[in-house]
Amino acid sequence: MRGTQPIAIITQNSTMREILHKLDKIAMSDSSVLLVGETGVGKEIFADYIHKLSSRSLKPIVKIGLAAMPSELLASELFGYEKGAFTSANGNKKGLFEVAHTGTIFLDDIDDTPLDIQSKLLRVLESREILPIGGMKTKAIDIRLVSASKVKLQELIKRNLFRSDLFYRINVVTIEIPTLRERIDDIPLLVEYFIKKYAPNRKLTIDKKALAYLTSYHWPGNVRELRNVIQRAALFAEDEITTDDIPNEIIQNSPMEHIISSCSVCFNQKGMEFSMVMDCLEHRLLQQALEKAGGNQSNAAKMLNLSLSTFRDKLKKHQKQSHFCG
């Protein structure tokens, strides 16, 4: 956890720490950054983190979700227009690039940008000038660009859905943000953070069994989904969040029934520390996947939606520990 930083990115995961270390190095530059990660991993928070650590931190960060904006309005929103450019243009309007002048512009869901807008974006990024719709004179802009994509843009380039020249322009530094299922060791920290956020005036806790279900769930909606689950649970729980406060789809799609029944000591032995319980559960999940995969680590990693390197790191960690219950 990086409590001394202006933007809180809650983590103890080694991969995430490496990413934050890299961002600390590049933030002060003006290099364009491309954030790649599934929906809900927190790409906007990473954009805020970069901006707040940059020399532009006292200037604006302007954000636009390209997927949410109708294509016919995108050009005028991004580049602005002059009075009389079209029927309803009763005055001049600054585009978001001009609003972000001397600051940072964050283009979310750049993978959803229409091809005609992609060509306009490329011209702006190459010339560092904008031409408002209906305008006759260009305006110089000084911005730091941070983009975000839900998918690897190389795949869209192969399908002629994304311009390769624009990709190379925005892809100076690429940061691939791990999914929540690849950083399950962060789930307890995030749960604690969201409990404090959504129940700030209560001594609300979560029981070990409920947390175990959350830790073993595959989280297709990533951190955003976890946040929503805890926010909802905090509304209805009394003093402690239990499995009764966890959505059924999490309970039903979790392998925890088998894990919990085989690891009952963890949940009944009051003397066990929380970290030991979590280590034991993770150890059992890894071993269970290895057994199902016939010892093939690559296939076991896929079963848990982990990269092979992350899976091996976790195996190595558990080989050094000896406090697992029987």
Image: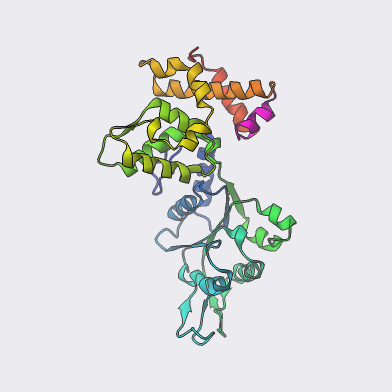
Residue 288 vs residue 142: left or right?
Answer: right
Q: Position of residue 103 (x, y in %)?
A: 46, 64
Residue at the spot 46% in from the left edge and 70% down from the top edge = 99
Q: Please report the bounds of the magenta region as a residue range.
A: 296-307
Q: Quadrant of the N terminus?
A: top left
Q: Is residue 12 visible?
A: no
Specify the quadrant of the image occupied by residue 138. Answer: bottom right
Give the residue at the far left of this rendering. Answer: 201
Q: Tell me the residue at 50%/73% (across/down).
A: 95
Q: Nearer the viewer, residue 57 or 132?
A: 132
User: How far across and how far down the image is residue 253, in percent?
Assistant: 53, 33
Residue placed farthest to the top in the image?
326
- Which residue occupies 52% across, 86% down? 87
Q: How is the image coloured?
A: rainbow
x and y percentages locating residue 246 in the rendered image: 42, 35
Residue 305 on the magenta span: yes
Residue 119 lies left or right of residue 277; in this view the side is: right
Q: Is residue 181 above or below residue 142?
A: above
* Left or right of 160, for residue 39: left
Residue in front for this viewpoint, 235 or 293: 235
Q: Is residue 232 left or right of residue 25?
A: left
Q: Nearer the viewer, residue 189 or 232?
A: 232
The verdict on residue 30 being magenta is no
Question: Can residue 75 be seen in this snapshot?
Answer: yes
Number of labels in the image equals 0
Give coordinates of residue 179: x percent, y percent: 55, 41
